[in-house]
Amino acid sequence: MNNVTIFRATVDDAARVLRDISYNTRAEFEVMGVDPAKHARRMMDVAPAYLSVCGEAPLTLFGFIDYGTYLSMWTIATPAFFSLGTGGVLATRRFFRGLKIDKPVLVVTTSPHPDVGRWLELLGFDFVGAEGERKEYRLVPVGRRQVASNPAVV
């Protein structure tokens, strides 16, 4: 069994993830034209970030940015995350259930990894749509699912 732990990230934790950023994550940031280190610093200045680890190996650095009516989730992953497969995703899903998320969460991804969509669905996200390499997913808090009947409306 995979021993995945998730906790509040520090700047040093972010540096650990950025030193070992995965090919898939780097490719996604290249498509967006964004430097992952600058992005992580900017996001961590705005809101808390979280680190997932398996043993001592960092898996992901992620966080949520509040845009008023919805949250936007960002993630930077290491090769260890992709090697772990669904184990890291299921641990993250358990972590999500403990958060008090009261508004929709959006994820926009251009990741080339073939399992990203399946993993987001395991987290509870619904596929909204795609345009070129850009794919959008939305997680609606359980108590609000009946209100959000149109996936294009946030």
Image (tube, rainbow, N blue to C red):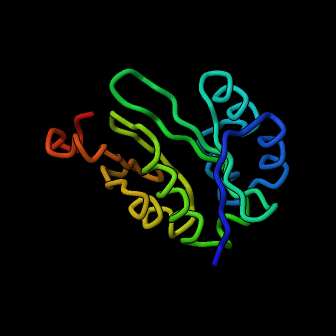
**Most foreground residue, 33 or 68:** 68
> How many dots with numbers?
0
Pinpoint residue 109: horizontal percent, then vertical percent: 50, 49
Pinpoint residue 37: horizontal percent, then vertical percent: 76, 36
**Most foreground residue, 98 or 57:** 98
State whether residue 44 is above or below residue 140: above
State the residue at coordinates (52%, 35%).
64
Outermost residue toward the bottom in this view: 1
User: In which quarter of the view is residue 22 placed?
Assistant: bottom right
State the residue at coordinates (19%, 40%).
148
Asked whether, in this view, residue 87 is left or right of residue 78, the answer is: left
Asked whether, in this view, residue 142 is left or right of residue 13, the answer is: left
State whether residue 150 is above or below residue 11: below
State the residue at coordinates (80%, 34%).
11
Asked whether, in this view, residue 135 is left or right of residue 128, the answer is: right
State whether residue 43 is above or below residue 83: above
State the residue at coordinates (61%, 50%).
28
Pinpoint residue 48: horizontal percent, then vertical percent: 62, 31
Pinpoint residue 115: horizontal percent, then vertical percent: 50, 69
Q: Quadrant of the C terminus?
A: top left
Q: Quadrant of the N terminus?
A: bottom right
